[in-house]
Image (tube, rainbow, N blue to C red):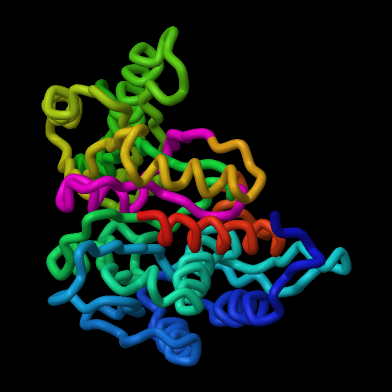
């Protein structure tokens, strides 16, 4: 089991380097090029930036000779907001945007896969593809959607923080919507609601629906509704209100029926729905999950499955590739997107060790 006394300086330096390159969505090219350069130094058979901007490295057998293909896909973009990179005096805690979400998990992929180069017999019939995907933090998921057309893996691991001794087997789905309503300006003494009031009423109906739906349910079963943005304006002739709403959708939720209800509530307004992803749940008894459980135990941990209320590229790729798939990575997901995002270097080492063991077992 890894601890501070067994930190690998090369691993720490790689992690620190990629954190220091600020890479919000659509600005990933510099960090992708750095990752490719480091993959080549680590001994990857092939490393390149693909047409979507993903950083890609391959180890082991080729597509023509492999008995099985394993894709490890983690995202290298972050939400906005640079956090100066620093290691605390304890020697373990490292701060930086993406330390948890999700450069830490991705670093465990790059370094855990490279560790197998010391045991070439474990690679002779496996093609291991590590993908640093772009735009996961944007509605586009550009990197994953490009990858879905270029690989057909037998196993897939998505890089997201789960904690080093946990494996994520499920995510909620998502619906993002934009509602806009415009009305001719009228005197405040006139009867009837204003455009602004109608916009607020639309949101209240969505929120009340979710409150009623959620009664008596566990959080994994709830519909989570969030008002992400609201803007009102007037040009002297018309009042206009615009709302952006995000929803986290549980398993077995009647999405089609709910979308019809939204259109009814929208009435004369303009409603657009985008960024729709279905919920996903993996088989917790698959060979991939069993390999993770065994690897975590061998590193001294007590493995357990997780289901998360967010979404990830697992929602994008799982239904397309239809292979055993999980999300994994060191880090505390409660620190995602926060101003004090930080990770443990000792946990990163454990994540690297787990990935190496999993790839050796598959």
Assign the C terminus to one quadrant of the image: bottom left
Whether the magenta-drawn stretch holds residue 251 is answered as: no
Whether the magenta-drawn stretch holds residue 320 is answered as: yes
Determine the residue located farthest toward the front in the rendered image: 121
Q: Is residue 202 left or right of residue 304?
A: left
Q: Nearer the viewer, residue 306 or 112?
A: 112
Instruction: Tell me what residue is drawn at x 46 percent, y 54 percent.
Output: 160
Instruction: Tell me what residue is drawn at x 36 percent, y 18 percent.
Output: 208
- What segment carries the magenta color? 304-332
Image: 172 above or below 217: below
Q: Position of residue 309 (x, y in %)?
A: 43, 35
Question: So how many labels did they put on this image?
Answer: 0
Instruction: Tell me what residue is drawn at x 46 percent, y 66 percent.
Output: 109
Image: 194 above or below 34: above
Image: 122 above or below 278: below
Q: Position of residue 156 (x, y in %)?
A: 30, 55
Q: Is residue 164 left or right of residue 268?
A: right
Q: Nearer the viewer, residue 100 or 272?
A: 100
Q: Nearer the viewer, residue 156 or 313?
A: 156
The answer to whether residue 196 is visible is no
Assign the N terminus to one quadrant of the image: bottom right
Determine the residue located farthest toward the right in the rendered image: 89
């Amino acid at each position: 089991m890894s601890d501070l006394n067994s930190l690998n300086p090369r691993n720490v330096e790689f992690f620190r380097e990629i954190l220091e390159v600020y890479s919000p969505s659509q600005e990933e090219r510099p960090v992708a090029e750095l990752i490719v350069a480091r993959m080549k130094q680590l001994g990857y058979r092939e490393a390149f930036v693909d047409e979507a901007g993903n950083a890609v490295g391959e180890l082991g057998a080729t597509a023509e000779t492999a008995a099985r293909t394993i894709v490890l896909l983690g995202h290298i973009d972050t939400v906005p907001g640079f956090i100066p990179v620093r290691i605390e005096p304890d020697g373990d805690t490292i701060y930086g945007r993406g330390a948890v979400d999700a450069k830490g998990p991705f670093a465990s992929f790059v370094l855990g896969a490279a560790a197998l180069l010391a045991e070439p017999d474990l690679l002779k019939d496996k093609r291991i593809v590590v993908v640093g995907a772009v735009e996961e933090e944007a509605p586009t998921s550009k990197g994953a959607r490009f990858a879905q057309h270029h690989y057909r893996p037998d196993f897939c691991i998505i890089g997201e923080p789960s904690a080093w001794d946990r494996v994520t087997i499920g995510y909620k789905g998502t619906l993002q919507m934009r509602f806009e309503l415009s009305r001719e300006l009228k005197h405040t003494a006139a009867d009837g609601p204003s455009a602004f009031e109608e916009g607020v009423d639309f949101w209240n109906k969505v929120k009340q629906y979710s409150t009623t739906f959620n009664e008596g349910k566990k959080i994994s079963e709830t519909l989570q509704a969030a008002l992400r943005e609201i803007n009102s304006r007037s040009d002297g002739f018309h009042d206009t209100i615009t709302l952006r709403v995000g929803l986290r959708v549980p398993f077995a939720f009647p999405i089609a029926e709910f979308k019809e209800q939204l259109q009814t509530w929208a009435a004369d307004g303009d409603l657009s729905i985008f960024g729709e992803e279905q919920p996903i749940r993996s088989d917790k008894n698959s060979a991939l999950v069993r390999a993770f459980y065994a690897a975590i135990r061998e590193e001294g941990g007590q493995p357990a499955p997780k289901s998360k209320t967010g979404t990830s590229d697992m929602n994008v790729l799982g239904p397309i590739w239809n292979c055993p798939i999980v999300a994994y990575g060191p880090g505390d997901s409660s620190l995602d997107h926060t101003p004090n995002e930080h990770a443990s270097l000792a946990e990163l080492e454990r994540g690297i060790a787990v990935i190496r063991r999993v790839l050796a077992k598959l």
